[in-house]
Image (tube, grey):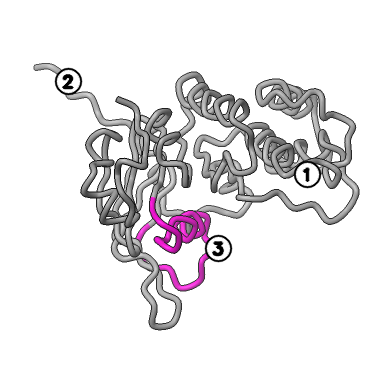
Amino acid sequence: MSAVQAAPTAALELADLRLAYGRRDVLRGIDLRLSPGERVALLGENGAGKTSLLRCITGVADGARGEVRIAGRPAGLYQRGELARRIAVVPGQTQVAFPLRVEELVALGRIPHEHPLLGPRDEDRAAVASAIERVGIGRLVGRDVRQLSLGERQLVGLAMAVAQGARLLLLDEPTAHLDLRHQVEVMRLLRRLADDDGVAVLAVMHDVALAAHFFERVCLLHEGRLVADGPPAEVLTADRIRAVYGVDPGLVRLPA
């Protein structure tokens, strides 16, 4: 008798996820599963619920209902520090209110791993150096984060998440404020993190063409509902683009 190989534990599972602000339903029964090493782009018009979905996953959205499981375990059962070792988040904008050098901000990603008494260890310093190299921000080392452009801050925030070493990476508009070259470099980095490190990537995107080119799977949100989930060519049809975004599909240049 041949043994049946068990399916790998999902990096993220959402079941009947719902969120309402007062009488307004923001998320309506979202079911979603990400496997280790999978890259998924979350698309939809403004107000569709994309950022709210990320907030529900990280537990910062009040009033969320449904189930969120991280690595097969309900998110609510994790201690805060343990969850920080599982999930890394790159927000839409990285804000810093006090003087902080680039390498110091990146090093904050190692806090969940640091020894409570000994502080940073050699492995933490190595992770910071590796993250700076992988994101390609060595030229920014030593500079005050507050003096960087918005695009440069975005890259530093990404490096902090990479240094964190989590197996689930959530990004809210990772290419915002970046020029074309850096957009492509970030997309390629996300691909390497998934392929080489087994990181599951869920990224909120507004650039439909960029998402279609670099992501193997896209999820389309519309008015709080997940209306399509699959390969870009199957999800981003002319009828769906017209229905969700209210624009002529001919204006959206998608990969052939």
CA distance separating discs 2 and 1: 44 Å
The residue most toward the left is: 1
Instruction: Using a 10 Å C-alpha cutoff, classify the residue at mark 1 as few (fewer than 14 neighbours), some (14 to 19) or many (20 or more).
Output: few
Q: Position of residue 249 (x, y in %)?
A: 29, 44
* Residue identifier under label 1: 116
Nearest to viewer (mark 1 / mark 3):
3
Secondary structure found at label 1: loop
In this rendering, the count of numbered labels is: 3
Nearest to viewer (mark 3 / mark 2):
3
| Labels 1 & 3 near each other (Cβ < 8 A) | no
Q: Is residue 65 above or below residue 178?
A: below
Q: Is residue 143 above or below residue 67?
A: above
Magenta region: which residues?
Answer: 44-67
Instruction: Using a 10 Å C-alpha cutoff, classify the residue at mark 2 as few (fewer than 14 neighbours), some (14 to 19) or many (20 or more).
Output: few
* Residue identifier under label 2: 3
Q: Amino acid at mark 1?
A: Pro
Secondary structure found at label 3: loop
200 left or right of 6 in image: right
Secondary structure found at label 2: loop
Quadrant where the C terminus sits is top left
Q: In the image, what residue occupies the spot 84% across and 29% down?
A: 141
28 left or right of 93 in image: left
Of pointers 3 and 2, the one earlier in the residue sequence: 2
Q: Position of residue 18 (x, y in %)?
A: 35, 66
| In the foreground, 86 or 189 | 189
| In the foreground, 86 or 221 | 221
Of pointers 2 and 1, the one earlier in the residue sequence: 2
* Residue identifier under label 3: 60
